[in-house]
Image (tube, rainbow, N blue to C red):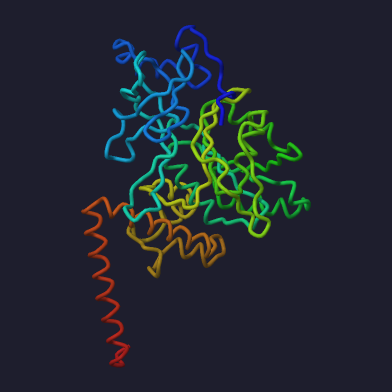
Amino acid sequence: MSFSALPSLTHTSLPHALAALGWDDAWEAEFAPYAEQGLLAGRVVRVDRGQCDVMTADGIVRADTAFVTPHDPLRVICTGDWAAVEATGNPRYVKAYLPRRTAFVRSTSSQRSEGQILAANVDHAIIAVSLAVELDLGRIERFLALAWESGAQPLVVLTKADLVPDVATLGHLVQDVEATAPGVQVLTVSSVTGEGTDVLAAIVGDGTSVLLGVSGAGKSTLANALLGAEVMEVQAAREVDGKGRHTTTTRNLLALPGGGVLIDTPGLRGVGLWDAEAGVGQVFSEIEEYAANCRFHDCAHEAEPGCAVLAALDSGELTDRRLESYRKLLRENQRIVAKTDARLRSEIRRDWRLKSAEGRANYAAKRSGRV
């Protein structure tokens, strides 16, 4: 892709030149020690194979990332970072990046259970969900958990609204998603009719937004609508299942004409949690509220007496699907954390042994006729 959507920066004062990319007084104060060393400030707009493109007051700088490539994958430089770049040299090097305000992290699809940082310094996490296929509420909850954990404000955007001509049906779909995303705005948009794009542009016009979703969700089309130009390549989704090919192959930072910055990401096949317990709690805030009224503070919400969560389930205030999704994400997150936390791993193994012993005892009792 080209960087034609990025602002044309001049040799004016640094804060003014980078303001369109989110530079502010706090960033300037953080950068002061690097400015004294003669380094340039800039925002990373793309990272690719040991190099990155950084927008500075002098324009786009291609820089080597050898100095900011640690063994910890969560500390590598990524799109959205504010970097300190050498003013001269061939090649130029990124010498450091500023501490991140927020970071969107998922677990990798590898067996090594490493975290992967997708975007840094994000204010809004836009979760694009296509209405051309059946809604996967569990996947939406998963995206929301990562978004809340990142520190950004989530926003669910239901794309391709023009493919749901029945107003009543569309209303029910929106209600289902709203019930899945407490405290999150849900917006329907259509790139064909233009529905909702002006509202979305107003929301993302202040700060940095990251665009997330699976392939075929319409992210590139949505990005083009916000940019007001065909900047991102668009490919049609398969009619059989609504899935698309990976039109976007790198994470790109783009300045929006109405203000704000957008980071477009490739479609995500897997959305694994990464130490996102607080994010899960935020997504299922109503369950957390019920749990606060359980008789026992360590209630597992399985069969304990005085369990407010099970009471809500019995009364119909809480659905089986919602509770099972909550349990599933908590278990998954606990497994991920346990792989990097020896103490927690030991506690889980002890619980497994106790439950296994209890199960064997119950089975033996049944066999002997005592139960």
Q: Residue furthest front?
A: 90
Q: Position of residue 179 (x, y in %)?
A: 58, 52
Front residue of 231/310: it is 231
Position of the N terminus by quadrant: top right
Q: Is residue 56 above or below residue 211?
A: above
Q: In screen coordinates, is 304 left or right of 145?
A: left
Q: Position of residue 91 (x, y in %)?
A: 35, 21
Q: Position of residue 13 (x, y in %)?
A: 46, 7
What residue is shown at x 63% (from left), y 29% (from top)?
Answer: 227
Q: Is residue 367 above or below residue 114?
A: below
Front residue of 349/54: it is 54
Figure label count: 0
Front residue of 16/228: it is 228
Position of the C terminus by quadrant: bottom left
Q: In screen coordinates, is 145 left or right of 248?
A: left
Q: Residue furthest bottom?
A: 369
Q: Quadrant of residue 76?
A: top left
Front residue of 341/254: it is 254
Q: In screen coordinates, is 337 left or right of 313?
A: left
Q: Position of residue 86 (x, y in %)?
A: 34, 17
What residue is shown at x 73% (from left), y 36% (from top)?
Answer: 194
Q: Quadrant of residue 96?
A: top left
Q: Residue furthest top?
A: 12
